[in-house]
């Protein structure tokens, strides 16, 4: 009888905690390592692609739609060096480009202890390419903006009533279409096309605030 009573009390307490989460906002600021898992199919000259790693500040906002379910908007921008590798022209410096990849995910949160709130979910990403700087052998290069699919896994760890530490990992399945034209001194100003997969990992640690 005592065990049943204790179980019922714990359930009620648990439900009370979950009920407090509905309508809650959380904001997080993180240091994020962006690690592309790049590859490409390049017409005419063959080869693949290499895209540099980088570390950026990342901001996100979470709103609890239900007791354990939230919508999460992730904001940040990254700059990468892009190289065509193993082509008939050797390795070609394609230059640098900025990516603006706003991402919306829906997360399920499962408390596992006092102040420890892991989460997992998935969503959609739309990446905008801008600020293109061509490499020395490139006259022009274009990147097509694209939608992608994102998955997310992480944990919030309370350090006070309002503040918490956050650890987070995301995988974004992202590809783009490129048109590249070389300068006249390289392959006579040839134009090639490429389908490039960027598929980055985003590994983050930071702090957050509840409001």
Image (tube, rainbow, N blue to C red):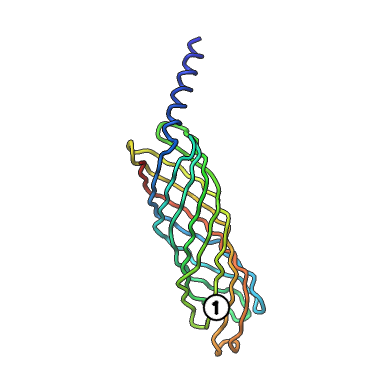
Instruction: Give the total number of marks visible in the rendering.
Output: 1
Residue at 62 percent of width and 79 percent of height: 192
> Neighbour class for label 1 at 10 Å: few (<14), some, many (≥20)?
many
Please tell me whether residue 62 is drawn above or below residue 52 in the rendered image.
above
Q: Position of residue 182 (x, y in %)?
A: 56, 83
Secondary structure found at label 1: strand
Outermost right residue: 44
What residue sits right under mark 1 in the picture? Answer: 92
Please tell me whether residue 91 is drawn above or below residue 128 in the rendered image.
below
Please tell me whether residue 138 is drawn above or below residue 150 in the rendered image.
below
Residue at 35 percent of width and 44 percent of height: 209
Q: Quadrant of the C terminus?
A: top left
Q: Position of residue 163 (x, y in %)?
A: 34, 41
**Residue 207 in the figure: left or right of residue 65:** left
Where residue 189 sits, quadrant-wise, is bottom right
Q: Position of residue 58 (x, y in %)?
A: 41, 55
Q: Position of residue 41 (x, y in %)?
A: 64, 70
Residue at 41 percent of width and 45 percent of height: 166
**Residue 164 in the figure: left or right of residue 18:** left
């Amino acid at each position: 009888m005592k065990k049943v009573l204790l179980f019922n009390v714990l359930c009620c307490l648990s439900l009370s905690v979950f009920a407090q989460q509905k309508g809650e906002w959380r904001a997080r600021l993180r240091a994020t390592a962006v690690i592309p898992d790049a590859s490409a199919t390049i017409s005419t000259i063959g080869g693949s692609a290499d895209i540099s790693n980088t570390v950026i500040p990342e901001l996100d906002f979470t709103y609890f739609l239900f007791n354990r379910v939230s919508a999460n908007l992730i904001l940040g921008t990254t700059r990468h060096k892009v190289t065509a590798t193993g082509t008939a022209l050797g390795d070609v410096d394609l230059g640098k480009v900025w990516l603006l990849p706003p991402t919306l995910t829906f997360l399920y949160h499962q408390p596992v202890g006092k102040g420890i709130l892991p989460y997992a979910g998935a969503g959609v990403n739309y990446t905008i390419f801008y600020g293109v700087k061509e490499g020395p052998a490139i006259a022009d290069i274009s990147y097509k903006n694209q939608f992608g699919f994102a998955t997310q896994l992480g944990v919030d760890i309370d350090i006070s009533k309002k503040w918490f530490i956050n650890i987070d990992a995301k995988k974004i399945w992202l590809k783009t279409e490129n048109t590249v034209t070389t300068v006249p001194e390289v392959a006579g100003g040839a134009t090639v096309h490429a389908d490039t997969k960027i598929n980055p990992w985003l590994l983050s640690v930071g702090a957050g605030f509840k409001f």
